Amino acid sequence: MHSFGYRANALITLGVTVLALMCAMASLSDNLNSPTPSAQVQVLNVNWFQKQRNGNEEVSLTLNISADLQSMFTWNTKQVFVFLAAEYETPKNSLNQVSLWDGIIPSKEHAKFLIHTTNKYRFIDQGSNLQGKEFNLTLHWHVMPKTGKMFADKIVMTGYRLPEEYR
């Protein structure tokens, strides 16, 4: 007969193997979900647009952010990290990204939202590149699963322009 140690080892190995297979199946099942998120951002007001003493430009915006991210939640989703970024080009850089707002969505019940806010983080350009500049607002998200790999995606909203004059 086998000793107690051999039997315990076999039982623990079987348990760990079954747990690993269940985690792999859970991770693979997320690939079957094809989310269809939607988002819309309105710039209600440019609160101020000014040149700082050091030559940088700063903008404060009032925004309405509405999104429906419920389709990203499956039984394997722990939370979703969301952030809104202003993206624009300058002669020096082909892509400038400035984070304006972010949030963590802990559950499907909180994944459909409408937020009226000013930018949470300062919108500053190092230089004089923002006057009359066209920019995109991009809603990025990172889905954090309970098990498996994280994935990220975004919705780009175009057609925004900053004023020609400082306010």
Image (cartoon, helix red, strand yellow):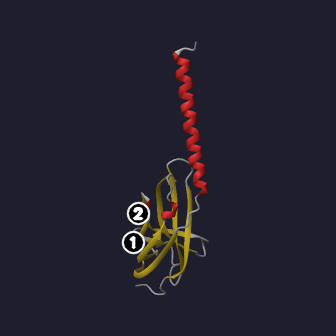
The reply to whether the C-beta atoms of the residues labelled 2 and 1 are less than 8 Å apart is no
Which mark, by number, is residue 152?
none
Point out the image quarter for the C terminus. bottom left
Residue 165 visible in rendering: yes
The extreme front residue here reads: 1
Residue visible at 55% across and 67% down?
36
Image position of 71 with respect to 116: above or below: above
Circle 2 residues within 10 Å: few <14, some 14–19, many ≥20: few
Residue type of the residue flagged with mark 1: Ile
Residue visible at 55% across and 43% down?
23
Q: Locate residue 26 relative to residue 107 in the image: left or right.
A: right
> For numbered disc 1, what is the local secondary structure?
strand
Disc 2: which residue:
110
Image position of 95 with respect to 105: above or below: below
- The x, y position of residue 31, in whole percent, is 61, 55
Which mark, by number, is residue 115?
1
Instruction: Give me the C-alpha separation between circle 2 and circle 1.
Output: 12 Å
> For numbered disc 2, what is the local secondary structure?
helix
